[in-house]
Image: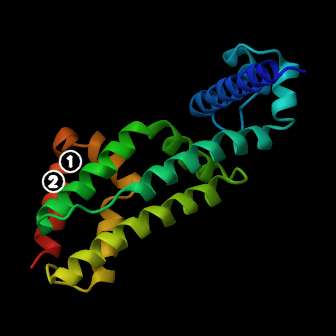
Amino acid sequence: MRTYVQRARADQRERTALAIERAALRELGIRGYADLRLADVAQRAGVALRTLYLHAPTKEALVSAALGRRAVALARKVERWQPPEASAAAVLDDLVAYHERTYRSDRQVLEVLELLVDSGAPGGGALLRSLDRVRLQLIERAMAMLARRGALRVRPEHAAALAHALLAYPTWRAALTGPAKRRAPALIADALRSSLLA
């Protein structure tokens, strides 16, 4: 078989897999894990049920594939963030802004992961913990840098714990949907600056 034909087929398989995984995430968000039906996912993705079964033979495999790919992409995005070489307040502001951007761009995945954890579905808790570990490492890196500069008034591990709690997904969801709404990121940044910086 010609190379360009193989490449075209591989591209088509990848597009089909992405369509199926996007449809699975949408259906999970709408119906939840317990009511997820593979026929509905296939219809939303615009593929035959047989094609869906070739991609993922079970509901667990489908959810795992869909969330696994998105979780890896989200973890890579989080790992790339580096604290800026700026004032301590600017580092905290950038950390908050980065978490806000990540939350807004990947809200669907985070909501589905939380839904899976709440429903006790297999794999959801492990993926959420894995993402949270990456996020905690990022926060610890920023706090260690601030501690080396002498900018923290508390121990770095306490600063990381507070920042981790304030920047967690459930906190963001509550802050952005509560009375603070759009001011939530600024209020969280103010809370971090006033409690952590010397």
Residue 19: horizontal and vertical position, in percent?
66, 23
Residue at left 32%, top 74%?
160
Please identify the quarter of the rendering in which residue 159 is found: bottom left
Q: Is residue 4 left or right of residue 126?
A: right
Which dot marks residue 99? none
Q: Look at the picture and state if 121 lies above or below 92.
A: above
Q: Quadrant of the N terminus?
A: top right
Element type where label 1 sits in the image: helix
Q: Is residue 133 left or right of residue 95?
A: right
What is the residue that sits farthest to the front in this orientation?
2
Identity, as a three-letter code, of the amino acid under mark 1: Ala
Which dot marks residue 184? 1
Residue at left 17%, top 75%?
196
Q: Quadrant of the C terminus?
A: bottom left
Tell me which colouring the rendered structure shows. rainbow
Residue 169: horizontal and vertical position, in percent?
40, 52
What is the residue that sits farthest to the bottom in this orientation?
155
Residue at left 65%, top 28%?
18
Q: Is residue 62 left or right of residue 135?
A: right
Residue 113: horizontal and vertical position, in percent?
57, 47
Please identify the quarter of the rendering in which residue 3 is found: top right
Q: Work out how far the residue at label 1 is from the one at label 2, CA to CA, in angstroms.
A: 5 Å
Which dot marks residue 187? 2
Marks 1 and 2 close (CB-CB < 8 Å) = yes
Residue 109: horizontal and vertical position, in percent?
53, 41
Residue at left 54%, top 46%?
73
Identity, as a three-letter code, of the amino acid under mark 2: Leu
Dot 1 surroundings within 10 Å: few (below 14), some, or many (20 or more)?
A: many
Dot 2 surroundings within 10 Å: few (below 14), some, or many (20 or more)?
A: some
Q: Is residue 9 left or right of residue 108?
A: right
Element type where label 2 sits in the image: helix
